[in-house]
């Protein structure tokens, strides 16, 4: 039901509205995060012509991005997906950690640190066979 409504709304709105903020500075992705809706979060971030992964960096008036909200509420599944999506691409001038870097743990587990504009650092381990 929610997905049908979202699909309909996405078909009639401007993609720029995905980054629109309410009075508290929260975007639709903040609300999907607070309600632990992975599929909706994915649709918002992956919407063609939309802001894409940039939505994950938008902070509300409390200074929290959707990634920070996911971490604060303990929504590990969403936080993990956000970290995977915002992983930087070497073609954009940023390096991705290789197997010899301190960020890679045994068994292809990856330790990720993300620093926001306020200097706050979020740490997360991504387990499994994650390819970097």
Image (cartoon, helix red, strand yellow):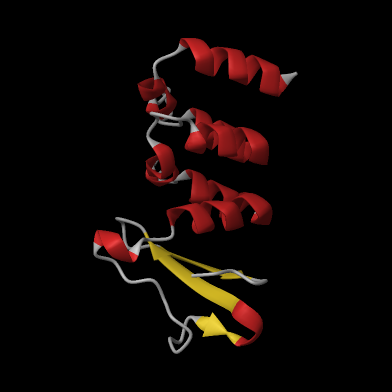
Q: Position of residue 121 (x, y in %)?
A: 42, 66
- Looking at the image, residue 117 lies above or below residue 11: below
Depth check, front residue: 1 or 47:
47
Q: Position of residue 80 (x, y in %)?
A: 59, 58
- Looking at the image, residue 101 lies above or below residue 12: below
Q: Residue at x 45, y 70 (%)?
A: 113
Q: Position of residue 56 (x, y in %)?
A: 44, 44
Q: Residue at x 59, y 69 (%)?
A: 130
- Looking at the image, residue 128 lies above or below residue 27: below
Q: Specify whether 47 is left or right of 115.
A: right
Q: Specify whether 60 is left or right of 3.
A: left
Q: Position of residue 132 (x, y in %)?
A: 48, 70
- Can you tell which quarter of the image residue 5 is in? top right
Q: Specify whether 94 is left or right of 111.
A: left
Q: Residue at x 24, y 64 (%)?
A: 93
Q: Which quadrant, please, contains the N terminus?
A: top right
Residue farthest toward the top in the current orientation of the protein: 12
- Looking at the image, residue 15 lies above or below residue 11: below
Can residue 11 be seen in this snapshot? yes
Q: Specify whether 15 is left or right of 107.
A: left
Q: Residue at x 62, y 32 (%)?
A: 40
Can residue 36 be seen in this snapshot? no
Q: How many marks?
A: 0
């Amino acid at each position: 039901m929610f997905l049908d409504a979202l699909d309909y709304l996405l078909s009639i709105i401007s993609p720029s509205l995905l980054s629109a903020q309410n009075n508290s500075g929260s975007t639709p992705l903040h609300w999907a995060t607070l309600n632990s809706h992975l599929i909706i979060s994915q649709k918002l971030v992956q919407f063609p012509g939309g802001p894409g992964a940039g939505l994950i960096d938008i902070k509300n008036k409390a200074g929290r991005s959707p990634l920070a909200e996911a971490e604060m509420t303990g929504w590990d599944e969403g936080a993990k997906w956000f970290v995977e999506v915002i992983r930087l691409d070497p073609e954009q001038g940023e390096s991705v950690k290789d197997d010899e870097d301190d960020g890679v743990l045994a068994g292809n587990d990856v330790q990720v640190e993300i620093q926001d504009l306020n200097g706050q650092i979020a740490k997360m381990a991504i387990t499994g066979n994650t390819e970097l």
